Image (cartoon, rainbow, N blue to C red):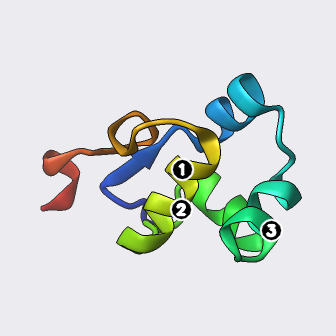
């Protein structure tokens, strides 16, 4: 399965900074737990709006939560 060029630190930040469960983060961001699972696994990149929701819920700047690797985008 191909990975996206966007990597994230959702799991680490969720556990270290907030102690939130996947379900709690999902509810806060108005998505399903399966969406959070897929994002944490790097199966797809979120929409810009969802990325901002996640960063806000985790109390972190967007650039701390998500990174883009241009080499992987080709």
Q: Which residue occupies 75% across, 32% down?
A: 18
Tell me which residue sits at (45%, 61%) in the image.
51
Q: Is residue 60 left or right of residue 70?
A: right
Camera-side residue: 42 or 12?
A: 12
Q: Where in the figure is residue 4, as x and y percent of width and height?
A: 37, 61
Q: On residue 53, which mark appears?
A: 2
Residues marked 2 and 3 touching at CB (< 8 Å): no
Which residue is under mark 3?
27
Position above or below: 44 against 40: below
Residue designated by label 1: 56
Q: Residue furthest top?
A: 16
For image coordinates 76% across by 56% down, the residue present is: 25
Q: CA distance from mark 2 to mark 1?
A: 5 Å
> Do residues under tags 2 and 1 come within 8 Å of each other at their CB atoms?
yes
Q: Is residue 68 above or below residue 34?
A: above
Do callouts 1 and 3 mark residues in contact (Cβ within 8 Å)? Answer: no
In this image, 22 relative to 63: left or right? right
Q: Position of residue 49 (x, y in %)?
A: 42, 72
Q: Could you say where residue 10 lies in the image, as x and y percent from the top left? A: 60, 43
Q: Which mark is residue 31?
A: none
SS class, disc 3: helix
- Judge whether 42 appears above or below 9 on screen: below
How far is mark 2 from mark 3, CA to CA? Answer: 11 Å
């Amino acid at each position: 399965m191909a990975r996206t060029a966007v990597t994230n630190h959702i799991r680490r930040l969720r556990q270290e900074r907030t102690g939130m469960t996947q379900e709690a983060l999902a509810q806060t961001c108005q998505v399903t737990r399966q969406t959070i699972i897929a994002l944490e696994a790097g199966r797809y990149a979120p929409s810009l709006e969802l990325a901002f929701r996640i960063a806000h819920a985790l109390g972190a700047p967007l650039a701390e939560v998500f990174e883009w690797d241009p080499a992987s985008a080709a």
